Each structure stands twice: as structure tokens, then as C-alpha cells.
Image (cartoon, rainbow, N blue to C red):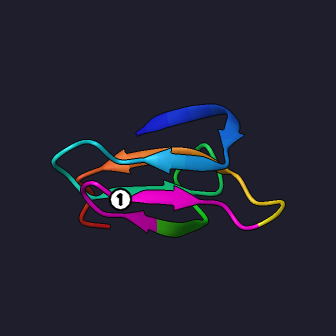
Amino acid sequence: MVELTDGAVRFSNDTTDTAFLYGTTDCSGGWGLVGVGATWDAPTGVRAYAVRLGSTQ
């Protein structure tokens, strides 16, 4: 898990694993999946505060 300081409104996944985005720094409130090579753009007023790579959730 990586905490995203101040949150992220855009996330590009250039890894070889699926990325799971979370609305909190403790990986709860999960609401986003970003596949390999994909980019995530937050809806207005939403930020991701943590990311986990290759999670089976």
C-alpha cells in the first residue's frame, strides 16, 4: 500500500499489476480499479488517498 499525500485526482498505471485505489489512507473505502496501462480520472471532488498494486482484495 502506498499513501498518496494530499490525494490524487489522476492516476496512470504503468506497472504490470492491477492498481486498486482507495478513498482513505488505510485502504478502506475502495472504489477504483486501474488496469495495466490505464489511467484513472477522479470525478469532481473525489480523491484517492492510497493505492495497492496486485491486490486480490
Relative to residue 37, is residue 30 drawn left or right? right
Relative to residue 17, is residue 21 drawn left or right? right
Q: Residue at x 64, y 57 (%)?
A: 23
Viewer-closest of 29 and 38: 38
Circle 1: residue type: Ala
Q: Residue at x 54, y 44 (%)?
A: 50
Q: Which residue is mark 1?
A: 38
Q: Among all residues in the image, which is located at the extreme left?
A: 16
Q: Among all residues in the image, which is located at the extreme right?
A: 45
Q: Residue at x 59, y 34 (%)?
A: 4
Q: Is residue 7 a member of the stretch shown in magenta?
A: no
Relative to residue 36, is residue 46 drawn left or right? right
- The quarter of the image holding the N terminus is top left
Q: Is residue 38 a member of the stretch shown in magenta?
A: yes
Q: Residue at x 23, y 53 (%)?
A: 54
The relative height of residue 51 versus residue 29 in the rendered view (above or below) is above
Q: How many marks?
A: 1
Image coordinates for residue 36, horizontal then vertical, percent = 24, 56
Viewer-closest of 36 and 47: 36
**SS at circle 1:** loop
Viewer-closest of 51 and 26: 51
Image coordinates for residue 3, horizontal then vertical, percent = 54, 34
The relative height of residue 33 versus residue 2 in the rendered view (above or below) is below
Q: Which residues are magenta?
A: 33-43
Image coordinates for residue 5, horizontal then vertical, percent = 66, 29
- The quarter of the image holding the C terminus is bottom left
Dot 1 crowding, Cα within 10 Å, few <14, some 14–19, many 20+: some
